[in-house]
Image (cartoon, rainbow, N blue to C red):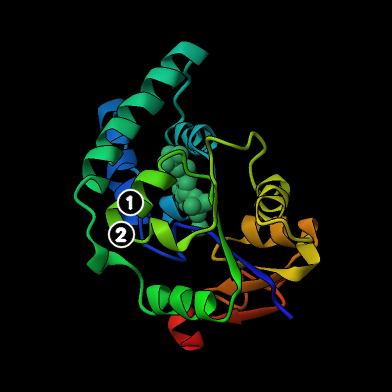
Amino acid sequence: TMKGAIFDLDGVIVDTAKYHYLAWRSLAKRLGFEFTESDNERLKGVSRMESLQILLEVGGVEANEAERLEMAEAKNKEYVEYISRLEPAEILPGAREYLLELRNRGVKIALGSASKNAAFILGRLGIAELFDAVVDGTKVSKAKPDPEVFLAASAALGLNPADCVVFEDAAAGVEAGKAAGCKVVGIGSAVILRDADCVIAGLHELV
Ligand code: G16
Ligand code: MG
């Protein structure tokens, strides 16, 4: 039985992908190319610097390390402007209710996100206090599909990974959860998330 639940943030708790997209698209525009919503799919669950690498490949743009850091910083500045206006109403359907239900059942709850803005986002959504632990991009160095984030999250809850269930919307995240030894519930397409133990459309299915 599940003693701990570990939630990815973007695509599971809130759709921040649309704000990432707006900020990446305007960077691409400044660099002189179009970045489409389907290109953006490739950035889901991927760290900031790896996302930039993919974007530069799409545009066929070369950049050195200093230029990349400057680009990533400019993108993040714009992204932070968008998420500064996030409201609790933007929590995805069922997420808040499911978190409350788990707390009532005594299940420990952690966040396992690649984002360096995760704590700020949870604060804006008014759900920070529902998490027993937050493991995000400021605390881990290896990106999903590496299991580091989920190993750290189960350890932060004081639990064995085998007693934890990971909720993930990205294929790399599902892979990371399985590699950590957790059970994994995929959120989204059963074709894309075929390595998950089960796949649902959203957390609303569980409340
Ligand atoms: C999220 C998004 C990614 C983003 C990453 C890093 O991951 O899905 O698109 O690049 O965080 O975000 P930031 O630039 O804020 O550090 P997750 O793990 O919450 O799905
Ligand atoms: Mg995600």
Above or below, comparing residue 29 to residue 180 in the picture: above
Q: In this view, does 28 lie to the left or right of 143?
A: left
Q: Is mark 2 on a helix, strand or loop?
A: loop
**In which image quadrant can residue 166 be found?**
bottom right
Residue 172 position within the rendered picture, expressed as x and y whole percent measured from the top left: 64, 55
Residue at x-position 40% and y-position 79%: 97
Q: State the CA–CA distance, disc 2 to disc 1.
A: 5 Å
Can I make out residue 44 in this image?
no
Residue at x-position 42% and y-position 15%: 67
**For the residue marked with disc 1, what is the amino acid?**
Gly
| Label pair 2/1, CB-CB below 8 angstroms | yes
Outermost left residue: 85
Residue at x-position 48% and y-position 20%: 62
**For the residue marked with disc 2, what is the amino acid?**
Gly
**Residue at label 1?**
123
Residue at x-position 63% and y-position 61%: 171
Above or below, comparing residue 70 to residue 8 in the picture: above
Above or below, comparing residue 133 to residue 199 in the picture: above
Q: In this view, does 86 lie to the left or right of 160?
A: left
Residue 107 position within the rendered picture, expressed as x and y whole percent measured from the top left: 61, 73
Q: Is residue 107 left or right of residue 126?
A: right
Tally the marks. Answer: 2
**In which image quadrant can residue 170 be found?**
bottom right
Toward the viewer: 72 or 53?
72
Question: Which numbered dot is residue 126?
Answer: 2
Can I make out residue 117 in this image?
yes
